[in-house]
Amino acid sequence: MSGCACSEHAVPPALERVEVVANDRVASGVGLVVLHAPRTAETVRSGQFVHVRLAHGTSFILRRPFSVHRVRGERIEILYQVLGTGTRTLAEREAGDEMDLIGPLGHGWEIPPGIAHALLVAGGLGVAPLGMLAEELAARGVAVTVATGAPNKERLLVRDLFEGVARRVEIATDDGSCGTRGFVTGVCENLLADEALDVVYTCGPESMQRIVAAQAAGAGVPCQVSLERLMACGIGACLSCVVRTSQGLKRACVDGPVFDAAVVLWDLTEIPAKQ
Ligand SMILES: Cc1cc2nc3c(=O)[nH]c(=O)nc-3n(C[C@H](O)[C@H](O)[C@H](O)COP(=O)(O)OP(=O)(O)OC[C@H]3O[C@@H](n4cnc5c(N)ncnc54)[C@H](O)[C@@H]3O)c2cc1C
Ligand code: FES
């Protein structure tokens, strides 16, 4: 299994040659690739990501960042949405194909000591970095409640994983084909009112995470968000991934992608409070 969950014991990233074990379509435009990646599997912490060189050639000079969704022995799983050249190429990869990645990268989820109950709020592909976290929390005896949202039942992801480890799973779909009709933020608001929660973890569209962060702040519950930025280097050198915070500009690849929601300045016009 993965290494210690505290940030001080995060293991430095390394280049690893990996082999595709399986690559399956799990929903429309979404795949799950399983990679034999013993070093990453051993060292990754939930919420961290890997930077993958998907092929050779000019379109692939820049690696693509993907969260580690789950770890199984010497294998890691990546849940991916097909968007452009890189992810289309990833979808074509077959068992036995080789790639290389750099990882584990970034600052993952923090699990505060002594917590009893965590709420995980996912929107769409935002489930990707929350799978490993849900398993880790459950293994540590923390009660897990999940709120997960999708456009419709067919695009609802990793429901089985969440139902296997969580005490309660609430679903929202835009069209009402599964669970509550509407956005996952509506479900989140109700759970924050219903449940005694120690921490909220969220990933999904930034507009959704911003609302979840505000709801958690209103309920007095600490919240961690996982922010996506375009990433060129992945190691803190190029500044392509800047996040504005009340503590100054941060790099999502090394200071994040997980941030304390309380420090994130969501609005470009938001002025940092004087320290
Ligand atoms: C820390 C981190 C973790 C991520 N984890 C996952 C994951 O687990 N699963 C997953 O499917 N995707 C994840 N992403 C997003 C993923 O990296 C991009 O979707 C991917 O790089 C797109 O590559 P492409 O060549 O297919 O698309 P491109 O042709 O490069 O772009 C297609 C579209 O995707 C947008 N895009 C490209 N790169 C990013 C990016 N880094 N963030 C946001 N939008 C982007 C482009 O602006 C464009 O609109 C993550 C991104 C970050 C920063
Ligand atoms: S991706 Fe280069 S600094 Fe973050």
Image (cartoon, rainbow, N blue to C red):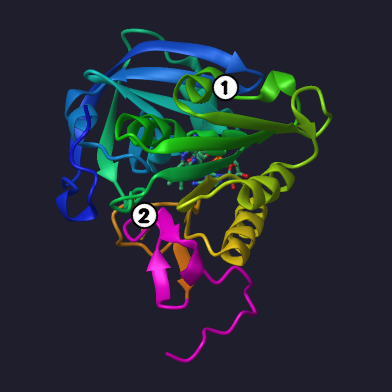
| Crowdedness near tag 1: few (<14), some (14–19) or many (≥20) residues, C-alpha within 10 Å | some
246 lies above or below 240:
below
Q: Say which residue label 2 marks.
A: 253
Is any atom of residue 159 visible in this view? yes
Query: Which-is-in-front pick, marks 1 and 2?
Result: 1
Q: Quadrant of the C terminus?
A: bottom left
Q: Quadrant of residue 241?
A: bottom left
**Which mark identifies residue 159?**
1
- 42 displayed left or right of 113: left
Magenta residue check for 266:
yes
Could you tell me how many numbered marks the image carries?
2
In this rendered view, identify the residue nearer to me: 109 or 250: 109
Q: Quadrant of the N terminus?
A: top left
Q: Where 167 sits versus 186, above or below?
A: above
Q: Residue 128, percent across and down? A: 48, 33
* Residue 45 pos. (x, y %): 28, 40
Give the secondary structure at mark 1: helix
Of callouts 1 and 2, the N-terminal one = 1
Give residue 79's position: percent from left, percent from top. 48, 27
Q: Residue at x 41, y 53 (%)?
A: 257
Q: Give the residue type that dot 2 points to.
A: Cys
Predominant secondary structure, magenta span: loop
Query: Magenta region: which residues?
Result: 246-275
CA gap between label 1 and label 2 equals 28 Å
Q: Measuring 39% from the left and 45% from the top, which residue is drawn there?
A: 116
Element under label 2? loop
Q: Where is ligand 2, by quadrant?
A: bottom left
Q: Is residue 247 magenta?
A: yes
| Beta carbon at label 2 within 8 Å of ligand 2 | yes
Q: Residue at x 18, y 42 (%)?
A: 4
At label 1, the amino acid type is: Arg
